[in-house]
């Protein structure tokens, strides 16, 4: 028996490859399926099953394409309904894989079809669970994504999750390994650990949601407290996972059409596409196409695209480092953004060489910021927890995920400074502001990490009620 966790950092997502006696199961695969097929070939094995823990909201799974390419059966738990051929398993149903068994444990709460898969080894011992978004390391899945007006509430789902954890997960032996679908950085939970595996015993000791003396009412209160609104693209990803989607090869073929600067400009005007610049932030600062949006490929790319662009059907034209266009399109497709319609041949340099209109962003060092800050407003675009922990005294908190709600704050000032933790998110925010016609902003290179090494006044904590 061989179990491999295939972890994708930018999505904080874990897919799983399980092989036994020449038969393979894949759990929660990503959109690009060839790596799983290649891995099975190395083992001279056949992919037999594709197990889905639930209809994912934060990424588009590769189950539909992988089943078509391999003939493997797609398996969902109870309450699932799809527009394609699949096996809807019953609670406690078992599937044989070589000489091991994978048992279905229906664990509703994150969603109503949420299912945990229990791996039972050849000796009949409970060995590991693949818990999806039911149980994370240090946390549990948020119970607000599947609520329906007039039907099921967030508190209802949290109650189901409480029962699932205590009736299906916590009775398992302490040495059973926990393989979750996500780790720290995912929007599917509140406070996940950076660790990506653990054990039932460890979680009983350290996970707040598994306290033995916790009542259901206490659980509902604690699990639902502090939930941020889910990103706008989540429901659209659920729909794609439930109804199906185009193969990735088709998406890449459409997106890797190169356009000259003149053709690119005409395409923008004709389609209303967003110009998405995915180069490094330092390159964007020095020069970019006016009104383009910066989200760098080498940062938290896909989740920020999903959070800030929102509509997966929005046409996108790319300004990318040469040779990385297919990579960008693939990563966009992971979160359901399939409407990339081309890229700028020769990248930004070709645009500048043609004498097309360009723009820049004023960006200064932390030392320069400390010397010229004066009475001008400072905007902090980090997350709530980061800001609450420590921030520049009198800084105004405008988290990047809600930038559009704070436009008037920026419009009111002749000049203002903007920063994040390290310089990536502040340039994203500045690009959004500039695309809305707000140019009176100065980015601080290196963000708060660099600022706190200067003599700028820092406050250690702010009560959330004062934000």
Image: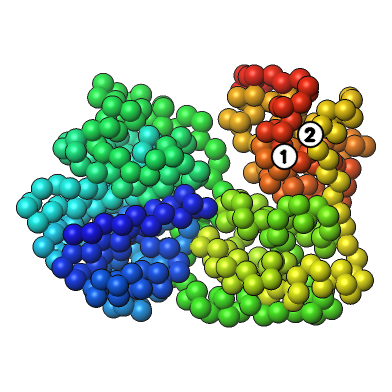
Left or right: 279 as drawn, with respect to 240: right
Q: Quadrant of residue 412?
A: top right
Question: Label 2: how many residues lie within 10 Å, few (<14), some (14-19) or many (20+)?
Answer: many
Give the residue at x 83% y 44%: 363
Residue under the image location 48 percent in, 45 percent down: 186
Q: Position of residue 11 (x, y in %)?
A: 50, 53
Q: Is residue 369 above or below residue 25?
A: above
Q: Is residue 409 visible?
A: no
Task: Give residue 256's mark.
Answer: none
SS of the residue under disc 2: helix
Q: Of the residues under marks 2 and 1, which one precedes in the sequence?
A: 2
Q: Position of residue 258 (x, y in %)?
A: 71, 79
Foreground pick, 219 / 175: 175
Badge number at residue 366: 2
Instruction: Please rate how many residues cluster around mark 1, counting C-alpha atoms within 10 Å: few if below 14, some from 14 to 19, many from 20.
Output: some
- Image vertical order of residue 229 relative to residue 122, above or below: above
Number of numbered discs present?
2
Which quadrant of the figure has residue 349? bottom right
Q: Position of residue 21 (x, y in %)?
A: 15, 68
Residue 287 shows in the view? yes
Residue lying at 86% horizontally and 54% vertically, measured from the top left:
360
Where disc 1 sits, the SS reads: loop
Are the residues flagged by discs 2 and 1 in contact, CB closer than 8 Å? yes
Q: CA distance from mark 2 to mark 1?
A: 7 Å
* Residue nearest the viewer, comparing 367 with 70: 367
For the rendered model, the colour scheme is rainbow
**Quadrant location, the N terminus:** bottom left
Q: Which residue is mark 1?
A: 446
Can you tell which quarter of the image residue 311 is in? bottom right
């Amino acid at each position: 028996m061989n179990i491999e966790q295939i972890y994708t950092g930018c999505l904080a997502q874990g897919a799983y490859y399980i092989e036994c006696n020449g038969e393979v199961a894949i759990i929660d695969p990503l959109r690009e399926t060839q790596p799983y097929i290649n891995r099975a070939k190395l083992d001279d094995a056949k992919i037999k099953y594709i197990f889905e823990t639930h209809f994912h909201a934060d990424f588009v799974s590769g189950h539909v394409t992988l089943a078509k390419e391999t003939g493997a059966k797609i398996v969902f738990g109870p309450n699932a309904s799809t527009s394609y051929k699949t096996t809807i398993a019953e609670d406690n149903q078992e599937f044989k894989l070589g000489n091991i068994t994978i048992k279905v444990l229906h664990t509703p709460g994150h969603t109503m079809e949420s299912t945990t898969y229990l791996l039972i080894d050849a000796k009949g011992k409970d060995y590991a669970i693949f818990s999806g978004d039911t149980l994370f390391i240090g946390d549990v899945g948020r119970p607000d994504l599947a609520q329906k007006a007039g039907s099921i509430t967030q508190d209802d789902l949290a109650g189901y999750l409480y029962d699932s954890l205590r009736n299906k997960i916590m009775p398992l032996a302490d040495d059973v390994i926990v393989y979750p679908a996500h780790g720290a950085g995912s929007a599917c939970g509140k406070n996940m650990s950076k660790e990506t595996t653990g054990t039932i015993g460890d979680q009983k000791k350290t996970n707040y949601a598994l306290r033995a003396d916790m009542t259901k009412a206490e659980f509902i209160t604690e699990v639902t407290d502090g939930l941020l609104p889910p990103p706008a693209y989540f429901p659209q990803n659920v729909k794609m996972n439930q109804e199906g989607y185009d193969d990735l090869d088709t998406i890449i073929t459409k997106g890797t059409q190169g356009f000259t600067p003149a053709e690119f400009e005409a395409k923008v005007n004709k389609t209303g596409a967003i110009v998405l610049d995915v180069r490094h932030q330092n390159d964007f600062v020095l020069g970019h196409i006016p009104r383009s949006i910066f989200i760098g490929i080498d940062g938290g790319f896909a989740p920020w695209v999903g959070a800030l662009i929102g509509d997966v059907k929005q046409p996108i034209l790319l300004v990318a480092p040469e040779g990385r266009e297919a990579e960008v399109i693939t990563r966009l497709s992971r979160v359901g953004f399939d409407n990339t319609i081309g890229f700028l041949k020769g990248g930004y340099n070709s645009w500048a060489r043609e004498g097309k209109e360009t723009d820049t962003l004023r960006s200064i060092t932390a030392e320069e910021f400390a010397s010229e800050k004066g009475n001008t407003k400072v905007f902090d675009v980090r997350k709530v927890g980061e800001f609450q922990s420590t921030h520049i005294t009198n800084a105004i908190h405008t988290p990047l995920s809600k930038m559009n709600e704070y436009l008037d704050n920026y419009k009111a000032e002749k000049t203002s400074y903007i920063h994040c933790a390290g310089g990536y998110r502040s340039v994203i925010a500045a690009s959004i502001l500039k695309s809305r016609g707000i140019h009176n902003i100065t980015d601080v290179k290196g963000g708060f990490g660099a600022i706190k090494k200067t003599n700028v006044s820092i406050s250690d904590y702010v009560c959330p009620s004062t934000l």
